[in-house]
Image (cartoon, rainbow, N blue to C red):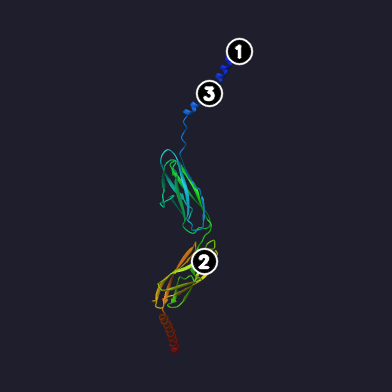
Amino acid sequence: MKKPRITYFLISVITLTVFLAFGSYGVVLAQEETTEEAPPPEEIKLSTTYPVLRGPSGTTFEFKVEASYRGEGERTFDLSAKAPEGWYASIQPAYEQTEIAAVRMRPFSPESLKIVLIPLKNMSPGEYVATLEISSGDLRDSIDLKAVITATYELALGTSTGRLNTSVTAGEDNHFALILANQGSDAIENISFSSDKPEGWSITFKPDKVESLEAGKTQEVDLTINPPGKTIAGDYAVTVKVTSDNASDDLELRITVLTPSLWGWVGVGIVLIVVGGLAVVFVRLGRR
């Protein structure tokens, strides 16, 4: 009679153990199912794949930035950009040319933006950082965008005398000396010359091309001006231009045309003035 009692006791212990184990687990599951998770806090985030761009002086830098908003409803965010000194920053939609100052966003729907950095003058080589900011109430974020100027390219065209006017004789070759200077930080290649001139005039350059000009160096250029022989005497404007792959300059000259006959009259006038002056001197000396 003792064996059935032992068996009954063991069965009872096992049953109670199983009940306690699975019963407590079920209670935990029920508690977990009834617990509600708190919604994540609202957030605005700016990000970019390429925060640093490089280019020579005069380059316009375009940064692509993505704005991501996490929240409960639509919201309008203000946009602003702090540009380095001497630069202009423009905030635009990624695929439009319209400048914007705010953007309306839906939760979990990213907006693609474009920040265009434009140098207002030739910038020295170096790093220039702009900051894009987005905000709405207590939500805000910012991102730094860096433009790296690798070199400056600047050509300056002038004259050997510093004067921007000269006199020429119609129907003849008249020479005028120009000075081309590389005021950049790197060599400038493939330099060529051209001009805007009155109809029928001949304007030539020697040399007419410069293969390469090192930084800080100058090149003298002989400008030959030949107005047609029938050109009416007077003042004319001639613009000479220098261009390369990454720099250019121009110079406006005032050209005074004297016809050969006019030169003759000028010579006669000079002779008469000299003779008249000598006559006056002799008369005064004779009276003494």
Which residue extends farthest left? 232
- Considering the numbered disc 1 on the image, is that residue within a helix, a strand or a loop? helix
Residue 64 appears left or right of 14 = left
* Disc 2: CA contacts within 10 A as few (<14), some (14-19) or many (>=20): some
Q: Are marks 3 and 1 in contact (CB under 8 Å)?
A: no
Q: Earlier in the sequence, mark 3 or mark 1?
A: 1
Does residue 222 sit above or below 72 in this rendering? Answer: below
- On residue 181, which mark appears? 2
Picture coordinates of residue 4, whole percent (x, y) = 59, 12
Q: Earlier in the sequence, mark 2 or mark 3?
A: 3
Residue occupied by mark 3: 22
Res. 239 visible in picture: no
Which residue extends farthest top? 1
How much space separates mark 3 and mark 1, taking CA atoms? 29 Å
Residue occupied by mark 1: 3
Picture coordinates of residue 152, whole percent (x, y) = 52, 60
Residue drawn at 52 percent across, 25 percent down: 25
